[in-house]
Amino acid sequence: MKLVAVLNGPNLNMLGTREPEKYGAATLDDLESLCAETAEELGLAIDFRQSNIEGELVSWIQECRGRAAGIVINPAAYSHTSVAILDALSAVDLPVIEVHITNIHRREEFRHHSYVSRIATGVIAGLGIGGYALALRAMAGILAEAGDEDQDD
């Protein structure tokens, strides 16, 4: 079973109470359950984590090298500020799908740019927490395709 890290950045621990008109009523626990159910359906294992600390996210990304098959990440506010997260994602050389609960392109101008998008295999934004299920489905497809290519060698 292939492992996918599902990493979440700052303030996502406040889901369900923080600006529910933007982020919805689902909590981080609800999001983790959705990801676990989707992963099980797809035959994936997940390592679901959230941190408000940039360095902790960087360390978790680095731990993925040689351990995980891919990363689904919502870097939240660090999307717009963190070269360190970009560098860590670049260094692990894994498929990355960036997820945002809201459509960052319909929000404040500073949110329109994401450093992570530069390295991401794909980006999903504005579909609520359902974007995570889509990201895991996409990751399963990417990993299956990569497995097919490995068999062709």
Image (spheres, rainbow, N blue to C red):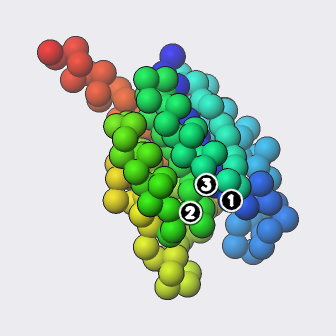
CB under 8 Å between discs 2 and 3: yes
Q: Is residue 122 left or right of residue 150?
A: right
Residue pointed to by mark 1: 10
- Disc 1 is placed on an element classified as loop
In the picture, the quarter occupied by the C terminus is top left
Q: Is residue 92 left or right of residue 77?
A: left
Which labelled disc corresponds to residue 153?
none
Instruction: Determine whether 66 is above or below 108 in the image.
Output: above
Residue visible at 77% across and 54% down in the picture? 13
Residue 137 screen position, x and y as percent: 47, 39
Instruction: Determine whether 113 is above or below 2 in the image.
Output: below
CB under 8 Å between discs 1 and 2: yes
- Disc 3 is placed on an element classified as helix
- Say few, some or many: other residues with alpha carbon within 10 Å of mark 3 (under 14 / 14 to 19 / 20 or more): some
Residue pointed to by mark 2: 78
Compute the Cα span from label 1 to label 2: 8 Å
Q: Quadrant of residue 118?
A: bottom left
- Please tell me which residue lies in front, 38 or 76: 76
- Disc 2 is placed on an element classified as helix
Residue visible at 21% across and 23% down in the picture? 149
Q: Quadrant of residue 19?
A: bottom right
Residue 148 screen position, x and y as percent: 26, 21
For marks 1 and 3, give the one nearer the viewer.
3
Compute the Cα span from label 1 to label 3: 8 Å
- Say few, some or many: other residues with alpha carbon within 10 Å of mark 1 (under 14 / 14 to 19 / 20 or more): some
Residue pointed to by mark 3: 54
Q: Earlier in the sequence, mark 1 or mark 3?
A: 1
